[in-house]
Amino acid sequence: MGIFKRGLSRTRQSLVGRISQMLGNTEIDEDTWDDLEASFIQADLGLETTETVLDYLKETTAREGITRTNQLDKVLKESLYALLDPPPPLNITGRDLSIILIVGVNGSGKTTSIAKLANRFKKEGRNVMLAAGDTFRAAAIEQLQTWGERAGVPVIANKPGSDPGAVVYDAIQAAQARNADLLIIDTAGRLHNNYNLMRELEKIRNVISKAVPDAPHEVLLVLDGTTGQNALKQGQKFAEATNVTGLIITKLDGTARGGMIFSVFTEVGAPVQFIGLGEGIDDLVRFDVKQFVDGLFE
Ligand code: GDP
């Protein structure tokens, strides 16, 4: 079974399973649209996306003369494909050292996602290093070191409580000295308010861009997919605080609310680059809307 199909079983059951069951094979009428609307909201598609999908379904069924509910699956699949463009390639090639900054609140799956990314890029032949920029949590530093050892990727860290800017500076120096071509930087997620968030991220960005002028080349925001629409609010906050270039949506295997993936681009303004579909080191995949939707339906 493919990772998309395996990982999305809960959303599949709640969204598609429910829809197929509910629809049966009857004439399409107002109740059909009401029932669909309720299902989309429940799967956390969000209001705006729900309206977009319903409009598409209504228009297409009218245009194509579709009158039976058992013909709706195919149109629904097409409408979901059309909601998202494929993410652009990551801007992490074509220079000596590329830098990815990872942001997100504690518990979102930040550390795990960094380990998964490091493992992935190392397998692709990159010379990867990690920086433990979340210096608030001793556990975060240790966890990153453990993952780094497992993936065979060096981790630059300092004592808990030390200045994250200094760790980031050291990490860039070390990456350059050791000819690393990709540095992935963890940041703190213990953020009391927008002001702190902005200041902390700004400081780190200043340190980075002083050392490597066009960096960071990607700023990836990690959002917990099990928190549905709440993740979107968090995403908006981060997007206000810093220039987020892409998203990693984690834990989509553990939720029936994977529908949020369809509204997150509109809400946060950055494309979904990766999704987390499990706790293992290989369970982070490039987001592909077609595979995602097919994973929901098959
Ligand atoms: P951080 O506090 O943001 O650094 O979060 P962690 O990386 O420590 O992750 C928090 C928990 O979520 C851990 O138990 C991870 O194993 C788990 N986790 C992270 N990503 C995924 C995922 O894609 N799927 C599942 N099922 N669990 C995940």
Image: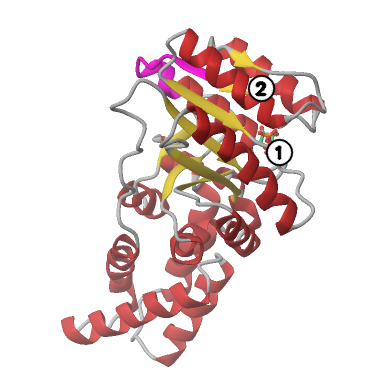
Q: Residues within 10 Å of mark 2 (few under 14, many from 20)?
A: many
- Judged from the image, the quadrant occupied by ligand 1 is top right
Residue 212: x and y in percent read 45, 29
Q: Amino acid at mark 1?
A: Ala
Q: What's the coloring here?
A: secondary structure
Report whether 290 appears left or right of 229: left
Q: Amino acid at mark 2?
A: Leu
The residue depicted at 44 percent of the width and 48 percent of the height is 245
Residue 288: x and y in percent read 34, 46
Dot 2: element? helix
Report whether 235 appears left or right of 122: right
Q: Which mark is residue 282?
A: none
View extreme (bottom): residue: 30
Span colored in magenta: 120-129
Q: Residues within 10 Å of mark 1 (few under 14, many from 20)?
A: many
View extreme (left): residue: 64
Of 242 and 71, nearer the camera is 242
Q: Quadrant of residue 170?
A: top right
**Which residue has dot 1 on it?**
188
